[in-house]
């Protein structure tokens, strides 16, 4: 049985959600406390970023024990309690599986370093490094103790890539997934899972074209099929998603088409690179709307035609807030937030909400480099300075691009520390918390709009199941698509700008019904004027 397409997933960054112990760090009991809030929003699944033991060099993506809970976040009993209580609310848990690499503190790496041959085969060791660059800056190879060899780390040097070619490694990793399945976990998000399949002979990257020698290798599909068969493929009602780095449509169709028995759906990031200058993240450039549209259309249609399935998202723990990137938030935060939400929740795929998005949270607007903690941001700042950028320019780039932007504490109310913690939070609260917080927004414009979108997906099969077709392709202001299901048609038009725009409406939709809008209802006519950041969904039923 395949997963339920009416589901909506909510992502929680546990470290920043709710602190109940007073150590400034969010915890599992904090999530339990907020289950009623999540149920009120209406989400079906909560994806939790890693809470396993870890030196926290990359905030938990450097796992040193896959089958335990980091005391920072609570205990295994807390997790079991969370899992039980969530189910009572009809909410399933999705865990983050970081199976491409483990922390160099993990006992596998430590044993390998101490000379254990069996565990040395767990890692990717070479006498001669390739020219690969780490995604967090610098070379992707580091000396392996005093052996004269090098180990591969596509991320930080404390995150050693695991050797999936070794059957013992696969066996151990499958055990990890099954351990959590045995605790009743039904959902899994697989971290950078299109990087696990490395070739036997590793070759230098020709040019860095965004798709180097270790991405989407054919063997990657084989490993995913093995993983599926040995673990979650045995569940009737599971839900799985793979994070795909620099990927393409043919591979994503294969990863997520049910007939390949790999994953239920995929995340790709192309649409979140439209404000990169020359493909480079650590730059600043206004977003390229035409490029954004093109990407949504080619992915929407390509995945629809190939029967693949997309995870739809604007925000996550690695991205600055979409509101700050795509919307004039000074004037149109409500309109922009609701338009962005509708543009993915009414599309084909499974929508993901990142904590705080449902209340329109913004980047924190920090004043100094000292406020940032993320390893990638700190490295990037040093590299920007080294490349000759003046300090203020380097800081402006970090401010716009840092992953810390989305990792700030959840804004619950206007009390001290935004109601997140009684202690000083591990990462500073955003400046706007007195105005933007759950308490206020529940009766505002954004939260109720999200509730409505979630309800609509559950009640209208055209939203959950319909195919995707591009619309108004020639417009340089409007991103629009149609969903088709039986004889029903749904048109969703989104004005991505702060100015009004007029479009022509076809006869079928002139007689249609407005399903949803983020402005007051308007008559449907031959011409339709969309207000700043307006979203409008029109349902046309054949008589
Ligand atoms: C993924 C995670 C990111 C992490 C990286 C390495 O991209 O989302 O937070 O740093 O993988 O595990």
Image (cartoon, rainbow, N blue to C red):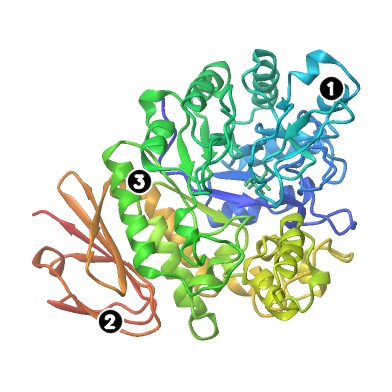
Q: Earlier in the sequence, mark 1 or mark 2?
A: 1
Q: Nearer the viewer, mark 3 or mark 1?
A: 1
Q: Which residue is mark 2?
A: 501
Residue at left 57%, top 51%? 10
Residue at left 79%, top 75%? 415
Q: Earlier in the sequence, mark 2 or mark 3?
A: 3
Residue 80 visible in the current orientation? no
For disc 3, does the CB lie below 8 Å from ligand 1?
no
Residue at left 58%, top 42%? 91
Q: Which residue is mark 3?
A: 464
Q: Which residue is mark 1?
A: 112
Displayed quadrant of residue 142: top right
Q: Nearer the viewer, mark 2 or mark 3?
A: 2
Q: How far across and down, in percent of the image, does residue 184 sit? A: 64, 27
Tag 3–tag 1 contact (CB < 8 Å): no
For disc 2, does the CB lie below 8 Å from ligand 1?
no
Q: Earlier in the sequence, mark 3 or mark 1?
A: 1
Mark 3 falls on what kind of element? helix
Above or below, 427 relative to 301: below
The CA span between labels 1 and 2 is 62 Å
Q: Is residue 286 left or right of residue 125?
A: left
Figure label count: 3
Q: Residues within 10 Å of mark 3 (few under 14, many from 20)?
A: many
The CA span between labels 3 and 1 is 48 Å
Mark 1 falls on what kind of element? helix
Q: Is residue 529 left or right of residue 60?
A: left
Q: How far across and down, in percent of the image, does residue 122 sit? A: 73, 21
- The one nearer the camera, 318 or 506, is 318
Tag 1–tag 2 contact (CB < 8 Å): no
């Amino acid at each position: 049985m395949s997963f339920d397409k009416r589901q909506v997933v909510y992502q929680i960054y546990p470290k920043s959600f709710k602190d109940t112990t007073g150590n400034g760090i969010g915890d599992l009991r904090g999530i339990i406390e907020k289950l009623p809030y999540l149920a009120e929003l209406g989400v079906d699944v909560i994806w939790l970023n890693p809470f396993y033991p870890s030196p926290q060099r990359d905030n938990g993506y450097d796992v040193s024990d896959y089958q335990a809970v980091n005391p920072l976040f609570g205990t295994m009993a807390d997790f079991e309690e969370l899992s039980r209580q969530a189910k009572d609310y009809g909410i399933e848990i999705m865990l983050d599986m970081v199976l491409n690499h483990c922390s160099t503190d993990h006992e596998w790496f430590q044993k390998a370093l101490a000379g254990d041959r069996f565990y040395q085969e767990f890692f990717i060791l070479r006498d001669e490094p390739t020219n690969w660059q780490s995604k967090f800056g610098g070379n992707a190879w580091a000396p392996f103790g005093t052996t004269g060899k090098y180990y591969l780390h596509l991320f930080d040097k404390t995150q050693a890539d695991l050797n999936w070619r070794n059957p013992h490694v696969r066996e151990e990793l499958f055990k990890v997934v099954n351990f959590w399945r045995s605790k009743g976990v039904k959902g899994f998000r697989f971290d950078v899972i299109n990087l696990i399949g490395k070739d036997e002979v590793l070759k230098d990257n020709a040019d860095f074209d965004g798709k180097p020698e270790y991405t989407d290798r054919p063997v990657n599909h084989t490993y995913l099929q093995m993983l599926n068969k040995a673990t979650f493929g045995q569940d009737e009602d599971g839900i799985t998603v793979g994070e795909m780095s620099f990927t393409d449509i043919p591979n994503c169709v294969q990863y997520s088409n049910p007939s390949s028995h790999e994953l239920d759906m995929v995340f790709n990031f192309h649409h979140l690179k439209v404000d990169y200058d020359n493909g480079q993240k650590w730059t600043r450039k206004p977003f390229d709307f035409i490029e954004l549209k093109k990407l949504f259309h080619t992915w929407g249609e390509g995945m629809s035609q190939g029967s693949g399935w997309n995870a739809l998202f604007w925000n996550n723990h690695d991205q600055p807030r979409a509101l700050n990137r795509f919307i004039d938030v000074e004037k149109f935060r409500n309109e922009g937030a609701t338009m962005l939400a509708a543009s993915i929740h009414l599309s084909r795929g499974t929508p993901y909400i990142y904590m705080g998005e449902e209340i329109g949270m913004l980047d924190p607007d920090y004043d100094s480099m000292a406020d940032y903690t993320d390893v990638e941001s700190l490295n990037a700042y040093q590299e920007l300075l080294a490349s000759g950028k003046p300090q203020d320019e380097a800081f402006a780039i970090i401010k716009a691009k840092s992953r810390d932007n989305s990792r700030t504490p959840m804004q619950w109310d206007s009390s001290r520390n935004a109601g997140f913690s009684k202690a000083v939070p591990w990462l500073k609260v955003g400046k706007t918390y007195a105005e933007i917080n759950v308490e206020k927004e529940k009766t505002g414009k954004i939260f109720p709009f999200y509730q409505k979108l979630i309800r609509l997906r559950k009640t209208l099969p055209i939203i959950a199941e319909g195919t995707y077709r591009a619309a108004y392709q020639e417009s340089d202001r409007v991103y629009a698509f149609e969903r088709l299901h039986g004889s029903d048609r749904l048109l969703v038009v989104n004005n991505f700008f702060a100015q009004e725009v007029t479009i022509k409406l076809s006869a079928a939709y002139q007689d249609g019904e407005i399903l949803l809008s983020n402005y007051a209802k308007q008559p449907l006519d031959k011409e339709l004027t969309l207000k700043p950041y307006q979203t409008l969904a029109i349902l046309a039923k054949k008589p």
